[in-house]
Image: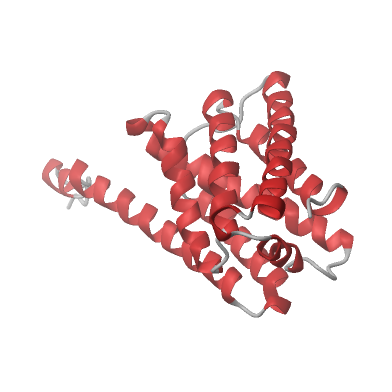
């Protein structure tokens, strides 16, 4: 007696293109739900738990991006110019925020004031520097792996450069949960810069370096407030 499957049985076990497409979409939506919910958790827990919430959320981003990496292909490319461009973008973004700080402090645009800025820095107040650097490293790896390495890569296939703004708006919408108008505004600016960097370099390493350097400048080395 033969236990070899027939051609009909083999064909029955091969998922149809539509079913495969639905499975990929379900995986992406599930991943997004995990990322969005953990971000809301990070921003809504009591302030004393923000660091822990940040570790949970950014770790989830990196994990989700890893699980969905089969959808996005190669995200690391050689070339020092890519790293140098990312470093340059970090300093450009810092200067943009420096100008934004002047506008917030002196012009009070759109009802945003210095207190909104201070509330962001207060999230990290009292955090030991080694722990803060660790959290900022996870922040850079998690956000860039998911929002650029996964989400922007997926959207770019159909939207091209418009994917930069789409991803920035999605990230900003999640940041509305902070109830701080400065958060989504800064996210749109920062995500647009990093989105452009990723669109040009196609190198996740460049974005992670850029994001981490900017975090260090803003929260450790040269705080803007």
For image coordinates 67% across by 45% down, the residue present is 100
Query: How many labels, in total?
Result: 0
For image coordinates 47% across by 62% down, the residue present is 36
* Residue furthest to the left: 8
Relative side of 82 to 199, left or right: right
Q: Is residue 85 visible?
A: yes
Q: Is residue 71 visible?
A: no
Quadrant in the picture for residue 153: top left
Quadrant in the picture for residue 111: bottom right
Position above or below: 191 against 36: above
* Residue 210: x %, y % from top left: 70, 37
Relative side of 218 to 15, left or right: right
Relative side of 160 to 113, left or right: left
For image coordinates 69% across by 63% down, the residue present is 120
* Residue 47: x %, y % from top left: 69, 76
Position above or below: 101 against 40: above
* Residue 135: x %, y % from top left: 74, 59
Q: Nearer the viewer, residue 35 or 175?
A: 175
**Which colour scheme appears in the figure?**
secondary structure
Quadrant containing the C terminus is bottom right
Q: Nearer the viewer, residue 65 or 16?
A: 65
* Residue furthest to the front: 107
Q: Nearer the viewer, residue 161 or 150?
A: 161
* Residue 39: x %, y % from top left: 54, 64
For image coordinates 72% across by 46% down, the residue present is 102
């Amino acid at each position: 007696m033969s236990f070899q499957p027939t051609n009909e049985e083999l064909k029955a076990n091969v998922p149809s293109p539509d079913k495969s497409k639905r499975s990929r979409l379900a995986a992406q939506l599930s991943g997004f739900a995990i990322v969005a919910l953990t971000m809301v958790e990070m921003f809504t827990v009591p302030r004393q738990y923000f660091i822990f919430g940040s570790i949970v959320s950014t770790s989830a981003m990196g994990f989700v991006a890893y699980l969905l990496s089969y959808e996005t292909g190669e995200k690391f490319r050689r070339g020092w110019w890519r790293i140098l461009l990312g470093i340059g973008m970090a300093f450009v973004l810092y200067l943009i925020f420096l100008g934004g700080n002047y506008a917030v402090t002196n012009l009070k645009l759109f009802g945003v004031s210095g207190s909104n800025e201070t509330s962001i820095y207060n999230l990290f107040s009292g955090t030991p520097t080694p722990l803060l650097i660790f959290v900022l490293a996870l922040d850079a790896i998690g956000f860039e792996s998911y929002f650029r390495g996964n989400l922007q890569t997926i959207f770019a296939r159909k939207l091209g450069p418009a994917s930069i703004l789409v991803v920035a708006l999605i990230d900003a919408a999640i940041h509305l949960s902070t109830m701080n108008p400065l958060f989504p505004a800064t996210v749109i600016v920062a995500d647009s810069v990093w989105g452009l960097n990723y669109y040009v370099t196609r190198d996740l390493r460049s974005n992670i370096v850029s994001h981490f350097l900017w975090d260090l400048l803003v929260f450790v080395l040269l705080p803007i407030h």
